[in-house]
Image (cartoon, grey):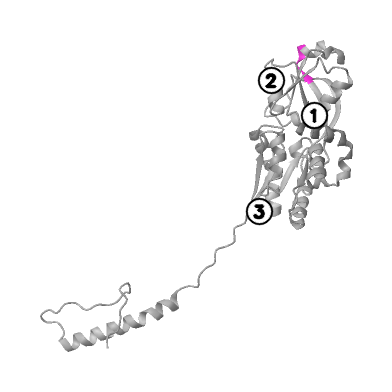
Amino acid sequence: MTLPCRPDATCALSAPYAPGAPSAEGRGRRRWAAALACAGLLPTLLRAQPPPVSAAPRVTPVRVGLTPFLSARSLMVSYEPLRQHLQARLGRTVEFFSARDFRALLDTARQPEQPFTMMPVHLARLLIEDAGFTLLVRSTLESPLSVWALPDTWRALSAPGAMAGRRVATADALTLAALKLERWRAEQGLEGTLQIRPHPNIGAAVLALRRGEVDLALAPESALRELPDGPGADLRSVVQLGVIPSPCWVARPGVAPAESAAFREALVSFEGAGDRSSAARYVAATPADLARWRPYVVMARERLR
C-alpha cells in the first residue's frame, strides 16, 4: 500500500544510501514512518487552521453639503469644528462638500449619496415645497445685512439717492442677501441706476470692492467675520437692509427618520459661539418657522426657471 504525501506538505524525507547508512530494511521502516506522518499531517493542519474571519461591514461616510457663501477653502476651515462635533456624535466619518454656486447647491442636495445639506432659509423652503425635503433645524443667529463701502466712497453716500450709478458687488444672485438688495433697489426706485454685480461668494465681492472694481459690497456682518482677514477696519456701512438668518439644515426625501433624528440631535448639541455662521447654534424647526421668507422663495423660483 502506498500512502500519499502532499507535495506541499512538510515531510521528513530519507537521505540517499551511503556507506555506513542504515540497512535497506531500516530505511524501509523509516520511509513507512515518514509516509504515515505525511498522511496524518493534513487532518492536523486542518484542525490547526483558525476559523475564517468575516470582513467587517464598511461604514459609509456621511456626506454633507455646505452653502457656498465663502470660498471652498474658507468654508472647510470655518466649519471644521462643526464637522468634528458631528463626527463624534454620530460615530461615523462626516465629509463636508461645497458647490460651485447656489444652483449647483440645489442640484447636489438632491443626490442620493448626500442626505443632508446646509441651505439658506428661502431655498430650504423652496425645496420643502417643491421637492419634499425635511427641515431639520434652523439657526438662532440673525445678522445685520449691510451695503459696505470704503471710507472715501462712504463719505459721499449720505442718502440712498446718492447710490445712483454705483456698482454693488454681491455673492451669488440666488442668495437671500442678493434678493433682498434687489427688492430694496426696486423700493427705492434705483432699478435703472444701481448696478448689482454677482460674484462667486462674499469673499470675492469684498475683494472686488477693495480692488476698486465696484463701489460697494453687500454682506451680512456674521459672514464678514468668516473671512480670512476678518471684517476689516476699512469697511463702512452705507445702508442696512434688515437682518438675515444663518443657513438652516435640510434632509432630502428618502432619508431614514432615525438617521435624520440623529443628525438633528447632533446639530442641536453643537455649542458654537453664536457670533458667526460657522459657530451658529441650532434649534429644531418646522416649515412654519420659514414663512416670513416666502416672498424670496417666489423670487428664487422665478430665477431658476
Q: Which residue is mark 2?
A: 208
Which x, y percent locates residue 118?
74, 41
Residues drawn in magenta: 148-152
Q: Which residue is mark 3?
A: 92
Which x, y percent locates residue 85?
70, 48
Residue 239: say if magenta. no
Measure the alpha-carbon separation of dots 1 and 3. 34 Å
Q: Residue at x 68, y 22 (%)?
A: 207
Q: Secondary structure at mark 1?
A: helix
Asked which quadrant contains residue 35, the reply is bottom left
Pointer 1 and pointer 2: residues touching (CB < 8 Å)? no
Residue 197 vertical placement versus 263 (above, below): above
- Could you classify mark 3 by the number of other residues whose Cα lies within 10 Å: few (under 14), some (14-19), or many (20 or more)? few
Q: Secondary structure at mark 3?
A: loop
Q: In the drawing, what numbered circle is on residue 177?
A: 1
> Which residue type carries mark 3?
Arg
**Which callout, 1 or 3, points at the residue further toward the start of the chain?**
3
**Which callout, 3 or 2, points at the residue further toward the start of the chain?**
3
